[in-house]
Image (cartoon, helix red, strand yellow):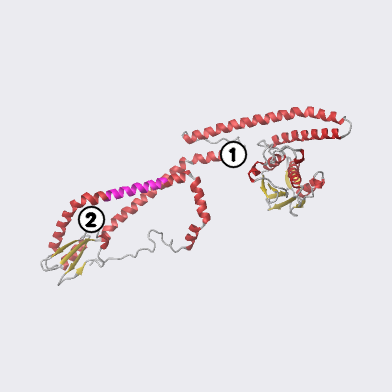
């Protein structure tokens, strides 16, 4: 008699082994951060959505094909196959004989993928330990024959042999679909790779770096898009260069008449009018100097005159000179901070502008401005904070733009025309650092990050 092994179904059908009992899997799936990351990737990844669309389309086509073929074979073919099966079952019943011959029945069950059950007054026998009820609704449904001596012969398709092949076909189909999806995934990644280069190029152009265009390796729609973005960047670079050239030309041309005007103002009799005139001329001189310095710092290769600089001494020197001497700035710097090779003059300009901005906009606050620093051995982080009214959040990213003012009125009491923080940002970038602003609640916080390594000696300029 054939041996039949009954397999126990898993606790969770379709789940991978251990998935139902592994607590780490459930914790990962229930983590809201995991869901947010995948939602963000889904919303911002075009090729991920295309691959999901391809997978859904492939599964839909496979399901439609399988259902259609099943309907086709279970409909028209059933009427054709049924009489053939009935005739074949009659032959099997005749072969078993009456009364039933167990040896012949067992030989048929071992040779053919059929299950045989004999019940009657003399013989009660079954070829399978468990009758294949799983196939009772199959088109080749179980058939019953009665022998002359009163025995009942029941035939059925062997479920294990019958279901093995469809399952194998299903797994092969699933494997082919997954392989096709993997190939399509790679192709989509290759097709959309220029989008990454375009995105990186647009980010560079947004920072004002127009020297490196977007590489164009394709001649399709994405290649045409990259060329159009390069053309736009070249046009913007030309406009900015023309603007800078105009500002430089005006600045150079104004220096000579401004110097003559100051000399003539010195000859005016002392009084409020003379002081106001000299103050206005000094502001014009500082504006022209700031314009020229911003143009030098905006060049790709800035010549920095680096020398070992003690930050603590530099800060206390700035606070000892007017107008910062009356600001009451509180200073907290690391005691073990070494001297580093930086451009001392430009770093002093950066810190002076940040401190002057903090004193000017936080002078009416109850607490004085603060300057603090942290050093991790490689990077120095300097924070300058005031306790004033702060800046609206939507304006924080614009504070370091040229000629930008958070307040629209350009009054003398609120300071210059908006080049001080621009120079601060350019000095930080020239040193390989970064400057950003954030609201401190109350007040504004300027955070400066600079590479700061101990100077071995006096380095060469540049």
Mark 2–mark 1 CB contact (< 8 Å): no
Tell me what residue is drawn at x 27 percent, y 51 percent: 70
> Which residue is labeled 1 in the image?
204
Tell me what residue is drawn at x 49 percent, y 35 percent: 223
Q: Is residue 51 magenta?
A: no
Local crowd at mark 2 within 10 Å, few (<14), some, or many (≥20)?
Answer: some
Secondary element type, mark 1: helix
> Which residue is labeled 2 in the image?
139
Q: Sequence order check: which comes first, mark 2 or mark 1? A: 2
Indicate the quadrant containing the N terminus: top left, top right, bottom left or bottom right. Answer: bottom left
Please identify the quarter of the rendering in which residue 414 is found.
top right
Looking at the image, residue 321 sits to the left or right of residue 18; the answer is right
Height in image: 350 above or below 127? above
Residue stretch in magenta: 53-70
Please identify the quarter of the rendering in which residue 342 is found.
top right
Secondary element type, mark 2: loop
Q: Residue furthest right?
A: 269
């Amino acid at each position: 008699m054939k041996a039949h092994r009954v397999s126990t179904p898993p606790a969770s059908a379709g789940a991978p082994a251990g998935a139902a009992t592994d607590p780490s899997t459930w914790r990962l799936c229930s983590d809201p951060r995991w869901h947010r990351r995948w939602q963000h990737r889904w919303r911002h990844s075009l090729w991920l959505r295309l691959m999901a669309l391809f997978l859904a389309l492939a599964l839909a086509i496979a399901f439609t094909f399988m259902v259609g073929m099943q309907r086709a074979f279970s409909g028209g073919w059933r009427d054709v196959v049924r009489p053939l099966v009935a005739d074949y079952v009659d032959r099997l019943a005749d072969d078993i004989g009456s009364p039933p011959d167990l040896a012949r029945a067992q030989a048929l069950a071992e040779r053919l993928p059929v299950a045989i059950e004999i019940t009657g007054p003399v013989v009660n026998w079954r070829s399978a330990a468990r009758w294949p009820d799983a196939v009772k609704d199959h088109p080749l449904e179980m058939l019953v024959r009665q022998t002359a001596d009163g025995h009942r012969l029941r035939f059925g398709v062997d479920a294990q042999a019958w279901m093995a092949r469809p399952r194998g076909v299903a797994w092969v189909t699933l494997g082919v679909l997954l392989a096709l999806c993997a190939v399509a995934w790679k192709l989509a990644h290759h097709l959309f790779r220029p989008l990454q280069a375009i995105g990186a190029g647009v980010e560079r152009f947004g920072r004002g770096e127009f020297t490196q265009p977007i590489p164009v390796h394709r001649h399709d729609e994405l290649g045409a898009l990259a060329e159009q973005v390069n053309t736009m960047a070249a046009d913007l670079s030309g406009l900015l260069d023309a603007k800078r050239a105009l500002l430089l030309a005006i600045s150079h041309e104004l220096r000579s008449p401004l110097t003559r005007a100051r000399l003539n103002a010195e000859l005016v009799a002392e009084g409020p009018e003379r002081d106001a005139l000299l103050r206005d001329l000094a502001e014009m001189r500082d504006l022209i100097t700031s314009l020229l310095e911003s143009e030098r710092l905006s060049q790709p290769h800035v010549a920095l005159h680096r020398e070992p600089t003690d930050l603590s001494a530099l800060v206390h020197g700035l606070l000892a000179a007017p107008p910062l001497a009356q600001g009451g700035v509180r200073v907290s710097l690391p005691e073990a901070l070494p001297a580093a090779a930086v451009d001392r003059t430009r770093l002093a300009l950066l810190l002076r502008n940040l401190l002057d901005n903090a004193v000017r906009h936080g002078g009416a606050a109850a607490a004085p401005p603060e300057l603090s620093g942290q050093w991790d051995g490689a990077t120095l982080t300097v924070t300058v904070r005031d306790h004033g009214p702060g800046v609206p959040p939507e304006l924080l990213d614009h504070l370091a733009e040229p000629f930008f003012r958070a307040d629209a009125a350009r009054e003398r009491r609120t300071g210059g025309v908006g080049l001080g923080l621009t120079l601060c940002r350019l000095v930080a970038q020239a040193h390989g650092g970064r400057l950003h602003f954030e609201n401190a609640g109350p007040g504004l916080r300027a955070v400066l990050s600079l590479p700061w390594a101990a100077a071995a000696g006096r380095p060469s300029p540049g």
